[in-house]
């Protein structure tokens, strides 16, 4: 689960991570009021979307007067920002963050994530602030400094100092950056974060060390014990279909292809996607209805797939074990009766109560193609699209 920059900064401030004064605003008037409250004569108007790269896309603008704050807010609010992280469809800006401006001397990078190879959290910092870390890792990996965190002790102050000195910092500034990193790591562990990026972490002309940008994501398996984080959830930023699926306890992920998949079991879902690819098609989603889904869950799963305008054919692939084939068949038929089915539907059923399931489908009178195996089903779905 991700949060907005303004929320991440609010959270980090509680851990003593230095940020500038700022206010979230949902209208142009509120943005101007925010700038007045903040005071001074330099502000930054920033689009709040769950994606980075806003600056380059025109979503971060410096203002030297209240009139400029107003003009920028008018321009950015409601705009669809397309950045390298939003995908080509972009994201509509519903919220702004108006922040005090600052005189940047140096832009650094600091981030934390899980190093899966080591099974530990890793802190990364780099002198190349404002640049994507993936790019730095590729072009000048020697500019990235890492320290892994021992779960028993947390990040040790000497490790943070080693990072700061590694980046060539000295004296007071090195100490401030080290302390910044220790606080960031503490916030990360405490909130069960999965990702944190401060890019840029700036050193100002006055020698202050500040988080100028903040991006945080959290481990969804830990949300049950992070009520304060869940409060910050912004559903308008999330895939509508995925939110809907979560409500019905379905595991659903939107993908780029055009064959909608309804499968039981994560392993079978993965091999179904592989088989579709093998036959030259592309899955539109990963959808696991699980082992114990009932008719209503199957029906909502089916409706979620049909909501996706990219879906040009549907493949239902069920291996009935605990899940009974007749339950799936009933769910599919119920959903199709409710929502118009205007794409080809291929169904492959096998396992518990398969005869009953096939009977329900045949008696439904729906234009369903039945498949005898996974390979047969995948091939039929791919061919159905080619034919249409
Ligand atoms: P994104 O990473 O999405 O492009 P950032 O928050 O990193 O957004 O902002 C982009 C750039 O805008 C920063 O690298 C920094 O140079 C500048 N910037 C952002 N906030 C401020 C601020 N409060 N004062 C001055 N410059 C800022
Ligand atoms: Mg940034």
Image (cartoon, rainbow, N blue to C red):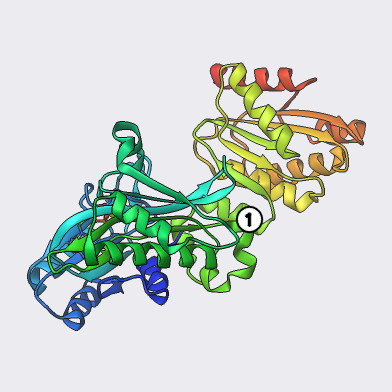
Measured as percent of width and height from the top left, residue 81 is found at: 29, 50
Q: Is residue 144 above or below residue 248?
A: above
**Secondary structure under badge 1?**
helix
Depth check: 41 or 156 in front?
A: 156
Measured as percent of width and height from the top left, residue 130 is found at: 25, 49
So how many labels did they put on this image?
A: 1
State which quadrant residue 288 falls in.
top right
Q: Quadrant of ligand 1?
A: bottom left
Instruction: Specify whether 354 is left or right of 381.
Output: right
Which residue is painted at 22% across and 78% down in the image?
34
Asked if residue 55 can be seen in this view, the reply is yes
Q: Is residue 172 above or below residue 196?
A: below
Instruction: Specify whether 331 is left or right of 119.
Output: right
Measured as percent of width and height from the top left, residue 373 is found at: 78, 20
* Mark 1 surroundings: few (<14), some (14-19) or many (≥20) residues within 10 A: few
Depth check: 131 or 33 in front?
A: 131
Which residue is painted at 35% across and 60% down in the image?
214
Q: Is residue 256 above or below residue 375?
A: below
Quarter of the image containing the C terminus? top right
Asked if residue 77 can be seen in this view, the reply is no
Q: Which residue is mark 1?
A: 246
Depth check: 53 or 200 in front?
A: 200
Which residue is painted at 91% across and 36% down in the image?
352
Depth check: 317 or 84 in front?
A: 84
Instruction: Specify whether 327 is left or right of 174.
Output: right
Measured as percent of width and height from the top left, residue 15 is found at: 42, 73
């Amino acid at each position: 689960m991700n949060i907005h920059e303004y929320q991440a900064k609010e959270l980090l401030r509680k851990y003593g991570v230095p940020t500038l004064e700022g206010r979230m605003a949902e209208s142009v008037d509120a943005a101007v009021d925010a700038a007045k409250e903040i005071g001074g004569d330099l502000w930054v108007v920033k689009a709040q979307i769950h994606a980075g790269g806003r600056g380059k896309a025109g979503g971060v603008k410096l203002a030297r007067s209240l009139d400029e704050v107003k003009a920028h807010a008018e321009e950015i609010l409601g705009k669809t920002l397309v950045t390298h992280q939003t995908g080509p469809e972009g994201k509509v800006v519903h919220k702004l963050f108006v922040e005090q401006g600052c005189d940047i001397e140096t832009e650094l990078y600091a981030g934390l994530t899980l190093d899966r190879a080591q099974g530990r959290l890793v802190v990364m910092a780099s002198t190349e602030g404002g640049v994507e870390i993936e790019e730095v890792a590729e072009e000048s990996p020697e500019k990235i400094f890492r320290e892994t965190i021992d779960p028993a002790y947390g990040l040790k102050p000497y490790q943070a100092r080693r990072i700061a000195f590694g980046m060539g910092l000295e004296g007071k500034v090195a100490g401030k950056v080290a302390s910044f990193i220790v606080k960031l790591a503490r916030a990360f562990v405490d909130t069960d974060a999965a990702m944190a990026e401060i890019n840029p972490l700036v050193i100002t002309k006055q020698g202050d060390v500040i988080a100028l940008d903040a991006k945080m994501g959290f481990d969804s398996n830990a949300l049950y014990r992070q009520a304060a984080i869940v409060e910050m959830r912004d559903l308008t930023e999330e895939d509508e279909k995925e939110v809907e699926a979560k409500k019905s306890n379905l595991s659903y992920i939107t993908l780029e292809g055009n064959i909608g998949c309804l499968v039981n079991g994560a392993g079978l879902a993965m091999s179904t996607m592989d088989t579709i690819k093998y036959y030259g098609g592309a899955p539109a989603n990963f959808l696991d209805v699980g082992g114990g889904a009932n008719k209503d869950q199957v029906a909502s799963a089916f409706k979620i797939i049909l909501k996706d305008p990219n879906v040009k054919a549907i493949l239902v692939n069920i291996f009935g074990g605990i899940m009974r084939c007749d339950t799936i068949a009933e769910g599919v038929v119920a959903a199709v009766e409710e929502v118009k089915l205007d794409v080809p539907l291929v169904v492959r059923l096998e396992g518990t109560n398969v005869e009953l399931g096939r009977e329900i489908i045949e008696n439904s009178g729906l234009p369903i193609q039945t498949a005898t195996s996974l390979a047969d089903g995948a091939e039929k779905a791919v061919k159905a699209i080619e034919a249409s």
